Image: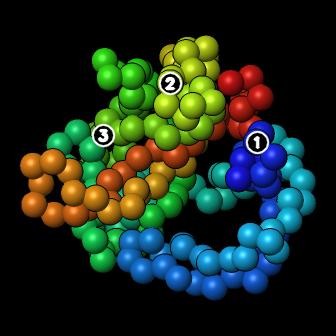
Amino acid sequence: MLRTRGGPFAVGGVNDLGAVRAVGSAPEMEDRLFDPSALRYLGRLSAADFWRTLLGAAAPDLATVFGTHLEPQGNGAAVEVGKGAASLGCILINRAVLEVDPWDKIRITFQSGNLHVELSVTDVRFVLDDFKTPNQPVIANAIQRFRSGVPAMLCVGLARAWRKPGDDLQRHWLQVNNIHFADDPLGGSL
């Protein structure tokens, strides 16, 4: 449903979902059900308006977004099924290390409050059209921005619950869904 593929959703896009029904449960409190046939694309925010919107939604750290049930798990963090205050949020950071690991997975490492995490990045702008292969020029651009100290907004989220191999519980694992830089929040130069 991405606008680049003929759908209605785009970074900075404004959509009217029509009637919605809350269907969320902890931690996925934001989940809403809507009729896709009622969905309308209304336009796109300017870069300045989009950045202001992100700043207005930003929390000071991961713990503020997800609540006390967000717990460190190895290099990442997760929330147990049925717990947590939210599944989506934004945090402003100034420093991070972005890289592609040996398995071609995009990873970002940063400090947020008391948590030091290394998370997967699922931003579709950072992969090619197959939604898997890292988009090296986009990643190099983002790495340079981080090195230059450009403030970045991380849109973070908890994945649907799954049990990691070797774990005894299903958990909602923390990931970075989008990266937006203050100097180009819509990602036109990414």
The reply to whether callout 2 and callout 1 are in contact (CB within 8 Å) is: no
Q: Residues under labels 2 and 1: Cα distance?
A: 18 Å
Q: Is residue 111 visible?
A: no
Q: Residues under labels 3 and 1: Cα distance?
A: 33 Å
Residue at 54%, 73% (x, y): give it: 31
Badge 2 density bin: few <14, some 14–19, many ≥20, Cα 10 Å:
few
Q: Residues under labels 3 and 2: Cα distance?
A: 23 Å
Give 116 or 45, whichever is nearer the viewer: 45
What residue sits right under mark 3 in the picture? 117
Q: Secondary structure at mark 1?
A: helix
- Residue 133: give its label: 2
- Residue 185 lies, in percent from the top left, at 71, 37
- Residue 138 lies, in percent from the top left, at 61, 20
What residue sits right under mark 1 in the picture? 5
Which mark is nearer the camera, 3 or 1?
Answer: 1
Give 135 or 118, whichever is nearer the viewer: 135
> The residue under label 3 is which amino acid type?
Val
Residue 19 placement: quadrant:
bottom right
Specify which label sits upstream in the sequence, 3 or 2.
3
